[in-house]
Amino acid sequence: MSETEGNGDFRSSPPAGAGAVLGLIRSGEAVTRADLARLTGLARSTVAQRVDALLAHQLVYEAGGSASTGGRPPTVLAFNHGAGVVLVADLGATHSRIAVSDLSGTPLAELTADKDIGLGPEAVLEWVHERFTELLRKAGRQDADVRGIGIGVPGPVSFSTGQPINPPIMPGWDGFSIPDWFASRYDAPVLVDNDVNIMALGEHWTYWRDTEHLLLIKVGTGIGCGIVASGHIHRGAQGAAGDIGHIRVSGHDDVVCRCGNIGCLEAVAGGRALALSLDEAGLKAKNSRDVVAQVRGGNPVALRMVREAGRHLGLGRLELGVLVRTVVLELREFDHRAIGVGYRSGLNDHGQCLTAADLEHVLLNMVRVLLQMISNLLWRNPISLSLADDVLGEIVLINID
C-alpha cells in the first residue's frame, strides 16, 4: 500500500513484490499461482519465487486444491493470520487503547485505560510496554511472536521516522523517536502515525474499500481529520494535512488554545473545551466523558453547548467539490442521539440543528479547508486492523522484498 508523505514522497512495496502478492492472497483476489500471474502480469517463475518466500516466512500456506477445469486442480493459497501477532497502541490525549492482534487485525487481548499523553514519552511508553507484556501473557503469546508494532498518537508525525513533529498537546514528544525506544525491547518493525490517520485507514479498509476518497473527522478531547485520497492516506507536509483542530474559528479571539494560538477549532468545540465550559457553568465536568454524562442526563446547558460545538464543526462557506465522495464523522465518546450539528445550506444563512441521522448532509458543508488540502492530490473500532495491515506491509518490505 503506497503512502504519501511530505512533498509527495512514497513508501511502498516494489510493484508486484512479495508484499503485493501477499495483499492479493489476503484479500482473496488471487488464491492460486495462476491467479497471481494473471493479475500481476508476472512470469510464473517469478510468482513461484514470491510465493516460496511467503511460504518460508509462514505468512501464507497451501490450503488444498480448488475445483479443476481439467487436469490437476490448482493449489489454493491462504493467508496465515496466526503466523504472529501485532502489538497495537492507540494513544489519545487522556485515554488509551492497547491490544494484541493477530495478523488479520483481530484482537486477541485488549484493554482501555486513562493515561495522560502529557506525562511525556518515557513515562507513557514504559506504561505501554508494561501493558503489552500483560496482554501477550493473556493471549498466550511471547515476545518472539511479535511481528510488528503499531502506535497511534494524537499529533502530527513524520511517518518515515516515527517522530512526532511539534505536537500541540504532547509536551516533550517533539522529535522523540518512538521506534528507537522500542528497538531494544522487541525485534520487530515499529510504525507510528497520527491516530486519526490510522482510524481513517481502518474505516476505509473495513467499510468503504470501494470508495476512492474519504475524510474521517474525529471529535474527542481534540479534533482531527484523516484524509484518504485515491485510496491512500495523505499526510501532507510534516504530517499535518488533517490537523483541522487548529483551524481558526472567527469570533473567538478570546479563546486561547493549548498550541498557543487563539480561536482554534478544538479550543472552541473539542471535548476538553466543552468540559471546561461546563465546569465554569457550575456543572461537574473534567473531561469529555463527563460531558457525555451530562448530555445523557438531559442537562439543557450541556445539550446547548454540544449543539453549538456541532455548529462550529459544520460551518462551511463553499460548496462541496466532486473529489470527496464519502465523509465519516466519529464523535468519540459522545452520544450520537443527543448531538446536534450545525450547517448552512443554499440561501439559508441560519444555523440548522441536526441529529446524527442527518450528518451526511451536514458534512457536505464542512470540508472547504480539507478540499483545499487535497484538491491537487490525484495520484484501513477498526484501528487494530489498520495498524496490523500497515505493520504487515512493513514486515514484508523489510524481510522479503
Image (spheres, rainbow, N blue to C red):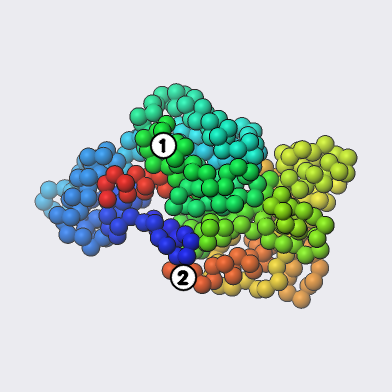
User: Which numbered disc, 1 or 2, marks the residue closer to the eye?
Assistant: 1
Percent position of residue 66, x then y: 22, 47
Q: Nearer the viewer, residue 120 or 235?
A: 120
The amino acid type found where label 2 is placed reads Leu
**On screen, residue 101 above or below 237:** above
Q: Nearer the viewer, residue 308 or 391?
A: 391
**On screen, residue 149 above or below 234:** above
Callout 1 crowding tier (Cα within 10 Å): few <14, some 14–19, many ≥20 = few
Q: CA distance from mark 1 to mark 2?
A: 36 Å
Residue located 72% across and 46% down the image: 271
Please indicate whether residue 16 sits to the left or right of residue 380 in the image: left
- Residue 299 seen in render: no
Contact between labelled residues 2 and 1, with CB atoms less than 8 Å apart = no
Residue located 65% across and 62% down the image: 363
| Callout 1: SS | helix
The amino acid type found where label 1 is placed reads Ala
Residue located 62% across and 54% down the image: 224
Q: Nearer the viewer, residue 33 or 333?
A: 333
Which quadrant, please, contains the N terminus?
bottom left
Q: Which residue is mark 1?
A: 183
Q: Quadrant of residue 319?
A: bottom right
Furthest residue toward left: 71
Q: Which residue is mark 2?
A: 378
Residue located 50% across and 34% down the image: 99
Furthest residue toward right: 282
Please indicate whether residue 98 sits to the left or right of residue 284 in the image: left
**On screen, residue 167 above or below 235:** above
